[in-house]
Image (tube, grey):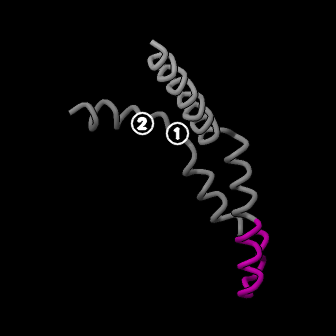
Amino acid sequence: MEDLRQEIEAIKERNKRVEADKAWETSTFRKVSIVLVTYCLATLLMWVIGVDKPYISALIPTLGFFLSTLSLGFLKQFWKTRIYDK
């Protein structure tokens, strides 16, 4: 009986970790942090290689990342009903 309790506690702890990881993956804080890091690194790289207006040019890869984080509900629904369910 004690083994069963320990297994249940281990499963509960694992579930907490999995929930925390999922919350991090979908958090706005994570997305904003990556957007800021992407912008800073892109700006630095563009400045180093001599791109005109690196502050504006760095917005392109940053915007690309941001768009990739959107769920695009209409495309998700299309995929679920027309592709995944088959």
According to the picture, the residue beneath numbered tag 2 turns out to be 76
SS assignment at label 2 = helix
Residue at position x 34%, y 37% from top? 79
- On screen, residue 66 above or below 70: below
* Amino acid at circle 1: Ser
Residue at the spot 49% in from the left edge and 15% down from the top edge = 2
Q: Which residue is mark 1?
A: 71
Residue 35 in the image: state x and y as whole percent. Answer: 70, 55
Q: Residue furthest top?
A: 1
Position of residue 9 measured from the top left corner of the image (x, y, whole percent):
54, 22
Instruction: Residue 50: say if magenta.
Output: yes
Instruction: In the rendered view, tell whether residue 40 sits above or below residue 64.
Output: below
**Label 2 is placed on what type of residue?**
Lys
Q: Quadrant of the N terminus?
A: top left
At x 57%, y 36%, the residue is 22
Q: Which corner quadrant of the image does residue 42 belong to?
A: bottom right
Residues at circles 1 and 2 in contact by the CB criterion of under 8 Å: yes
Q: Secondary structure at mark 1?
A: loop
Asked whether 50 or 24 is in front, the reply is 24
Q: Seen in the image, is 82 located left or right of residue 28?
A: left
The magenta span reads 40-57
Q: Residues within 10 Å of mark 2 (few under 14, many from 20)?
A: few
Of callouts 1 and 2, which one flags the residue occurring earlier in the amino acid sequence? 1
Q: Is residue 41 magenta?
A: yes
Q: Kindly report the distance in space between the C-alpha atoms of the residues bearing marks 1 and 2.
A: 7 Å
Query: Residue, x 54% and y 28% (percent of image)?
Result: 15
Q: Quadrant of the C terminus?
A: top left
Q: Is residue 19 left or right of residue 38?
A: left
Residue most toward the front?
A: 2
Q: Main secondary structure of the magenta part?
A: helix
